Amino acid sequence: MQPTSHAFKTNVHEALIDATLQKALGMMKTGFQGKRAQAVARLPEFEALRDAAKGIKNHTLEHLDFYLETFERNVTTRGGQVHWCRTPAEARETVLAICRRLGAKTVTKGKTMIAEEIALNDFLEASGIAPIETDLGEYIIQLRHEPPSHIIAPAVHLVKEQVADAFRASHTALDPKRKLEDARTMCDEARSVLRQKFLAADVGITGANFLIAETGSSVIVTNEGNGDLTQTLTKAHIVLASLEKVVPTLEDTATILRLLARSATGQEFSTYTTISTGPRRAEDTDGPGEYHVILLDNGRSAMLGTEFQDMLRCIRCAACLNHCPVYSAVGGHAYGWVYPGPMGSVLTPSLIGVEEAGNLPNASTFCGRCESVCPMKIPLPKMMRHWREREFERKLSPRPYRWGLGLWAFFARRPVLYRAATALATRVLGIAGQRHGRFRTLPLAAGWTQTRDMPAPEGRTFQSLWADKLKKNQARHEDTKR
Amino acid sequence: MGSIRTALKRGPLDAMHTAELDAKLELPARNLIPKRAASLDASGRIALFVAMAEEVQTTVTRVHSAAEVPGVVADYLAERNLPAQLVVTPDPQLDPIPWDLRPLLEIRRGRAEDGDLSGVTGCFAAVAETGTLMLISGPQSPTRNNFLPDNHIVVLRAEQVVASYEDGIDRLRLAARGSDGTWSMPRTVNYVTGPSRTGDIEQKIELGAHGPRRLHIVLIDGESGDPDKG
């Protein structure tokens, strides 16, 4: 998809005045957070598992070449094929080549953010192949011709009336007068429509939550079972995965899986966790005839060895999105590309450049909730700050911002001057604001005072008050000694 | 590969290092296992499995022997007004079931097709930790039988219930071991925890998204009724 991250401020403005979106976001806010908290409270080992998982991923990243080679060897031994793709274009062409060779007309898809990242659907359609999303959320947004707004609940920004409208507009073979008032009816309708697509599809494409080096396997996690019907019924199963998805062993996978569903939806375990290894065996009576794993780089190897390496531990659970006050206020589309929320704010500049995506790491108060709920202990605020530093160095931040920061830095490096300047400023503002106790407008601070009042300082700086307090305590201490 | 090594600021790993990592892959070590899945005896495992499974809308009926299976399955279908037709996998584990005890049940052994409303499969193991079934693909256990029918009935024997995922993985490595001592994964390993569901419409959980609407387990806890002796 074409990024609109550069237009973040406009996107946000639209999101905030969109009443339907705000209603939908309200529903999302309470669900995910409470459920995750319950699941975590129920598992005393959760913290220890976070450390174990972090250790597993860090070890893997430090030896990524070894584990990827091992993975490929084991995929090939089982009759599968690994395709190394550096760029989205290479990945798209590889998928197309497989589909063309098999004469594929329709392709069913399980949810995969990599497919969004490489803009696969539009490309396949332009090449005369019909991709059909099967995850209910992805299916709904495909009908509405819009991108996902959340990495695990793609249609979280919609209310059910919008879903009903989409179904009425697309499922034209059904009685237009039918009632579509509740989730149950719509779910059943999607089930029967998509069941036919599953059975007719030529090729099935899924993502991968993990790639297991030990066995040359890919792992997907769903609640619907769509990823399983996608890969079992077709001539070929294509797995789209980025490099950093690999983990060493089945045991390591189990460890991280214990964190995944609990962090994402508060479930003990997702309904369907499936480990796929190679094509169907000679004696099997079902399963895909071919198994392909597309290993996409697209900027991941460039993140290794940098201050952003920790981001490669991400398992795409979306806990950070679900707990972020900014995401809950504006939803995923405002971020303008595939990955929204805190993880998107760190990852997107790495993948599409800080010129395009620089707004994203700036849309944070560094409250730190994201880091506190991240199962892989990724220091998201720290990395957002690194992006801000890089923007500053490359003079990408707006000029008034850079001047303001530069000015502050000048004083901050000279504590005596700093104290004098702030003492003067608070004195002046204190006197000026005495009448009302607050300022409705302030020169140079329009960004603040446009939408809120600025309280007037009381005339002294914190540092001088603190110095007084220390002196008083010192005096009291000496009195009691005598 | 080149870009990975450049980024990590080193060349390819030396032979000793590689051998070390290879050895770890040959004999994978377990990481931390939650206490919930530790030190459980057989009946403890079964109790935990049933409790966790029922939490996710799996239903469980316990019987003492294979002979009771046709009866409970026929009743299960009748109670829900479902047709008395079943596709049953060719799994040898299911061979001892005397379906003739319920002659009105139409049984077809084979792969499930679209239109099969109810299916019976066996399974490889059951993980008590989260009430999760472990099913593996094979010529006698096609994966689609776990997903196509609306109603999925699984016959589980008490001795198949393990405590943790790692216990299940150990069993898989053992069972899949060839004559040369090496082992290989089946095409598909499905971990199934309850019936299919979605929350994609306004976060309201609905069962039966694309996979089965219902998951029912018939647990055979031993001829003598003692799970430790089954």
Image (cartoon, rainbow, N blue to C red):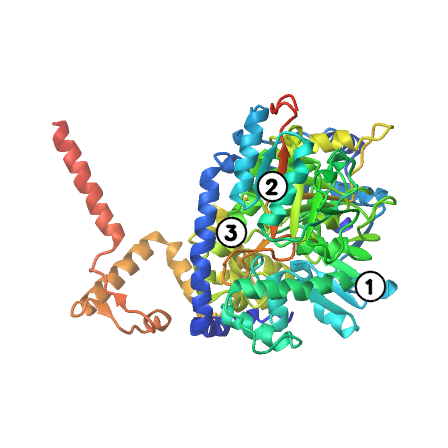
Cα separation between marks 2 and 3: 14 Å
Residue type at tag 2: Ile
Q: Position of residue B44 (x, y in %)?
A: 55, 27
> How many numbered circles does the render carry?
3
- Position of the C terminus of chain B, as image quadrant, is top right
> Are the residues under badges 1 and 3 in a single subunit?
yes
Within the image, what quadrant is residue A101 found in? bottom right
Quick check: can you spot residue A262?
yes
Whether residue A318 sits left or right of residue A252 in the image: it is: left
Within the image, what quadrant is residue A98 found in? bottom right
Structural crowding at the residue carrying mark 3, measured as other residues with C-alpha within 10 Å and reported as few (<14), some (14–19) or many (≥20): many
Using the image, name the chain to which the residue with label 2 belongs. Answer: A
**Mark 1 or 3 closer to N-term?**
1
| Residue placed under numbered mark 2 in the picture | A256
| Residue placed under numbered mark 1 in the picture | A99
Q: Which mark is residue A319?
A: 3
Q: Position of residue A309 (x, y in %)?
A: 61, 48
Within the image, what quadrant is residue A275 found in? top right
Report if the CB atoms under discs 1 and 3 are less than 8 Å apart: no
Residue type at tag 3: Ala
Quick check: can you spot residue A147?
no
**Mark 2 or 3 closer to N-term?**
2
Whether residue B175 sits left or right of residue A147 in the image: it is: right
Q: Nearer the viewer, mark 1 or mark 3?
A: 1
Of residues A439 and B225, which is closer to you in this image? B225
Cα separation between marks 1 and 3: 35 Å
Residue A194, relative to residue B86: is it above or below?
below
Residue A411, relative to residue A371: is it above or below?
below
Name the residue: 67% across, 76% down.
A173
